[in-house]
């Protein structure tokens, strides 16, 4: 389809602003822009149709099954959108006087209280805008803690090799040396490997539990004890909290701080890549290090962005929390786990799980045998799913499994959808044996064929230019 | 209510298929003493109607001012209806990051168009797909300018305090130094800058217009930075770029800013939009997602996430940033806003904001006891002294007007195209009345 610039017609415009009823002021010559930006010139109907056409070329949770592992693509309740659009929230200036923003404070305080209870933490901030930003915030708590104690030799953060890429990247942004430890054959932390790297230079450990292969690490208490004994702190990557919320609490596992992706576990929409929102929680002894805006709360603290965070996303998450309530929160987790196990059972016998045991909210298929047999890769299977209107699972992650497909169905999918999805996987398993070429060429009925990514990287075209 | 569609019977059947008796069987890897043996201490779930009532009651505890004369990083511009409705479309709203290009062309193309618009606004050659907000954009810019030898970042003391403190936090993270260049008469002091620049300085960050609304002599400051071998970063108000020289024309190597004025509500501080653009030379140092054009297997034009070798999921601890999720829907919003306004509409919003701020300024400073603090050229914000400041603000509030932000020097005022002459006259009248008492 055409780009919006290719639809532009010189002189066309929308008239939306009132006439200026005061005198214009001349921009001083030294500052004046001589050439207007080449923005598209369109009528409102052009704009509406253009973006509707684009919207038709997007697959969201509301279009169909979206088992993108590690991303918790659950249904985003519509009521959450309505609440976030209330003028009483959207129209509030972040620096308005305290007695005029009591409602906003109540939203933040209430959400913080509930999330502290769900995670077993004592303090909570909503300043970070996304998961990785929350990791940064959390690891900075660890850094400040050691710094304040004058414990300067703690320069290392331990990260399992199955971790999300954001974990080591975050540790590096916080000035720590990253120590990668290999996973045990069952995908969990290798206790011996952990012990061998722990020492008085350990600042902390970053861990996801359930981990990125969808298994709850049964040694978790031992792991956090070992880290604490070495003088380090334990950071909980809450990307997988959806499996355990209301069932078991990170605070009770021995973690000192945690981040939660509100756009995963608490059902706020992901918007094609963001905005997310992140809550970072901590135990009492770290509270003094939580970030705060200088403009809102005065000097004295670090801050990771302006103002109080992605507030309107927190409104959505609180609406969701109020809807679920004390029974709904564990019910969601339990059914997320049930759906994952059910789907794994239904697929088993064709594509095989990398770890054949009860999983948490997600599981990983290992297609290396299948690829050896048929030449059909995890990528080919993923692209073939697109022809069925299913968003592919996360591919080639975690890196400890080769030819990995990671599926996270979430609790908001029905048994019928899971049965259908399992049937699709079974069909593709058969197809791979009879017509592998068809799968190498997939997708066949999508918006586009496979894009040439090498060309995109070698000859970068990153903006439109007039021919 | 947990939005779980499967019926009780279906759940039982599924448990049987999995081979466990009940839900506890699913959690058998969890040390049993850790399982929560009590209900969560949060309220019972509510019906949609009850939730609506509860949330609406909270919203009602806020005051929404019909007239906003406060900015300082969050601006009350007019948001066209179509700019609200398009990003609310369910497909845009509920999609994830466009990892699978074959079913995400809509998101990818919208980002490619956004990148082009940001390049047009800033005069730069390359834009990323967004970062969290203007403050983190400045911090990311500081990080991208560093190399092995040059580690010190300079930032103007006339920049927004939240931006300065965010950059300071990021510098604390990597253990690098941030020095604040003092302001003089409400603008960056060039002599102080000259003194602080040196071999170890990687970048100088200036805000245009600055926190006090003043227009900085950005070309001269940029020259100083470049002469000392430092990169030059400009943090810009995107509305002002409708009428002000582009950062590229002013010599900037990196342009960043807070995109909130481009169609996002003030929303008590977020979600907002950090935009970042640079020259082709520094393209591969830019953090975050970038969308590129390519062709598909049939030779047709297509869009993909590109240059991913910079990113955390490939590079891990060596990545240019840890950013993963960004503010895609806000970038879409900004794109729709800019397409709707067009070059003429954007310039008009900028001109009216500037005109109304100047009208407000003249009116206020004509009142005895109210002085303009910084006398340089300004865009749509300015600082005045204000005797009996709290009384004045309280009286304005009673009339539904959010007055200027209290700062050390007095009040920092702002006007946008949304406020008409009548409202401005009313605000001026109230200040006059209070001070005449």
Image (spheres, rainbow, N blue to C red):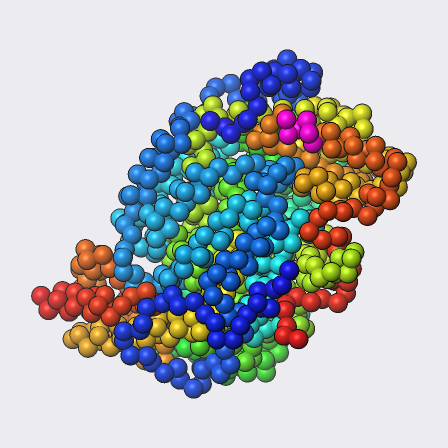
User: Is residue A294 shown left or right of residue A414?
Assistant: left
- Identified at 68% across, 24% down, the residue is A342
Q: In this rendering, does residue A71 appear at all?
A: yes
The image quarter in which residue B425 lies: bottom left
Q: Position of residue A121 (x, y in %)?
A: 48, 34
- Magenta segment: A416-421
Name the residue furthest left.
B437
Task: Name the residue at 45% across, 85% down.
Answer: A30
Quadrant including the C terminus of chain A: bottom right
Q: For this rendering, which residue is in front, A124 or B240?
A: B240
Q: Is residue A200 visible?
A: no
Q: Residue furthest right?
A: A373
Q: Is B235 or B102 nearer to us in this picture?
A: B102
Left-right relation of B63 to A457:
left
- B173 relative to B278, above or below: above
Q: Residue at x 88, y 35 (%)?
A: A433
Note whether A327 is above or below A164 in the view shown.
above
- Residue B31 on image: x %, y %: 62, 21
Does the segment drawn in magenta span residue A331?
no
The location of residue A153, given as percent across then percent down, is 63, 49
Quarter of the figure with the N terminus of chain A: bottom right
In which quarter of the view is residue A354 placed? top right
Residue plotted at (70% across, 59% down):
B302
Q: Is residue B186 above or below residue A182?
A: below
Dominant secondary structure, magenta: helix
């Amino acid at each position: 389809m055409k780009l919006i610039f290719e639809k532009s017609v010189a002189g066309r415009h929308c008239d939306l602003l009132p006439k200026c009823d005061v005198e214009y002021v001349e921009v001083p010559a030294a500052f004046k822009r001589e050439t207007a930006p080449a923005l598209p010139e369109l009528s409102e109907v052009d704009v509406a149709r253009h973006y509707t056409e684009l919207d038709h070329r997007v697959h969201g949770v509301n279009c169909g099954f979206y088992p993108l592992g590690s991303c918790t693509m659950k249904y985003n309740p519509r009521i959450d959108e309505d609440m976030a659009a209330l003028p009483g929230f959207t129209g509030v200036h972040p620096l308005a006087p305290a007695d005029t923003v009591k409602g906003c404070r109540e939203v933040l305080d209430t959400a913080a209280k509930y999330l502290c209870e769900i995670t077993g933490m004592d303090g909570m901030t909503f300043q970070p805008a996304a998961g990785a930003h929350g990791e940064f915030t959390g690891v900075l708590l660890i850094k400040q803690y050691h710094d304040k104690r004058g414990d300067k030799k703690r320069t290392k953060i331990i990260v399992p090799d199955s971790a999300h890429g954001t974990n080591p990247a975050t540790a590096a942004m916080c000035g720590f040396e990253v120590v990668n430890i290999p996973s045990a054959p069952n995908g969990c932390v290798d206790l011996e490997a952990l012990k061998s790297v722990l020492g008085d230079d350990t600042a902390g450990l970053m861990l996801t539990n359930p981990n990125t292969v969808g298994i709850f690490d049964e040694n978790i208490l031992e792991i956090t004890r070992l880290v604490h004994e070495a003088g380090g702190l334990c950071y909980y990557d809450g990307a997988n909290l959806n499996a355990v919320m209301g069932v078991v609490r990170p605070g009770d596992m021995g973690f000192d701080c945690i981040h939660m992706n509100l756009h995963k576990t608490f059902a706020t929409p992901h918007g094609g890549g963001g905005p997310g929102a992140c809550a970072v929680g901590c135990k009492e002894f770290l509270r003094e290090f939580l970030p705060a805006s200088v403009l809102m709360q005065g000097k004295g603290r670090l801050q990771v962005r302006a103002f109080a965070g992605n507030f309107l996303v927190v409104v959505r998450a609180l609406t969701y929390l109020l809807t679920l309530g004390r029974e709904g929160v564990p019910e969601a987790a339990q059914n997320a786990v049930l759906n994952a196990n059910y789907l794994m059972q239904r697929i088993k016998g064709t594509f095989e799980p990398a770890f054949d045991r009860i999983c948490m909210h997600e599981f990983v298929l290992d297609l290396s045998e299948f690829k050896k047999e048929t030449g059909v890769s995890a990528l080919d299977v993923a692209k073939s799913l697109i022809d069925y209107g299913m968003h592919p699972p996360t591919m080639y992650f975690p890196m400890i499994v080769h030819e990995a497909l990671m599926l996270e169905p979430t609790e908001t999918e029905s048994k019928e959808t899971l049965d259908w999805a399992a049937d699709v996987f079974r069909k593709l398993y058969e197809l791979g044996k009879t017509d592998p070429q068809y799968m190498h060429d997939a997708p066949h009925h999508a918006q586009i064929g496979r894009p040439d990514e090498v060309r995109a990287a070698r000859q970068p075209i990153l903006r439109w230019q007039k021919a | 209510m947990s939005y779980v569609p499967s019926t009780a019977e279906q759940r039982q059947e599924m448990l049987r298929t999995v081979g466990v008796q009940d839900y506890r069987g699913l959690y058998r890897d969890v040390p049993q003493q850790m399982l929560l043996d009590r209900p969560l201490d949060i309220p019972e779930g509510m019906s949609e109607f009850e939730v609506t009532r509860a949330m609406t009651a909270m919203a009602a505890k806020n005051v929404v001012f019909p007239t906003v004369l406060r900015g300082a990083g969050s601006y009350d511009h007019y948001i066209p209806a179509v700019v609200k409705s398009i990003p609310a479309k369910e497909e845009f709203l509920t999609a994830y990051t466009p990892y699978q290009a074959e079913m995400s062309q809509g998101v990818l193309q919208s980002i490619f168009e956004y990148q082009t618009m940001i390049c047009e606004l800033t005069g730069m050659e390359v834009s990323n797909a967004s970062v969290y907000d203007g403050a983190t954009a400045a911090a990311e810019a500081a990080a991208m300018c560093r190399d092995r030898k040059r580690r010190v970042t300079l930032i103007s003391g006339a920049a927004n305090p939240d931006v300065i403190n965010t950059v300071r936090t990021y510098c604390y993270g990597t253990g690098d130094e941030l020095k604040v260049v003092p302001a003089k008469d409400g603008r960056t002091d060039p002599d102080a800058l000259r003194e602080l620049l040196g071999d170890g300085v990687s970048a100088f960050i200036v805000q245009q217009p600055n926190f006090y609304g003043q227009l900085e002599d950005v070309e001269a400051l940029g020259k100083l930075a470049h002469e000392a071998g430092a990169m030059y970063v400009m943090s810009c108000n995107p509305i002002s770029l409708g009428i002000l020289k582009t950062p590229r024309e002013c010599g900037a190597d990196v342009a960043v800013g807070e995109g909130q004025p481009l169609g996002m509500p003030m929303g008590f501080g977020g979600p907002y939009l950090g935009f970042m653009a640079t020259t082709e030379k520094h393209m591969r140092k830019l953090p975050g997602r970038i969308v590129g054009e390519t062709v598909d297997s049939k030779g047709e034009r297509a869009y993909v996430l590109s240059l991913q070798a910079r990113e955390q999921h490939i590079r891990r601890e060596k990545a240019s940033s840890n950013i993963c999720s960004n503010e895609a829907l806000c970038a879409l919003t900004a794109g729709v806003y800019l397409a709707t306004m067009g070059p003429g509409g954007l310039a008009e919003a900028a001109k009216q904001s500037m005109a109304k701020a100047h009208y407000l300024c003249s009116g206020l400073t004509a009142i005895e006891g109210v002085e303009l603090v910084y006398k340089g050229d300004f865009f749509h914000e300015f600082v005045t002294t204000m005797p009996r400041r709290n009384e004045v603000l309280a009286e304005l509030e009673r009339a539904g007007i959010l007055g200027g932000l209290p700062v050390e020097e007095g009040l920092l005022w702002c006007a946008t195209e949304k406020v008409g002459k009548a409202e401005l006259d009313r605000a001026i009248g109230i200040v006059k009345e209070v001070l005449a008492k």
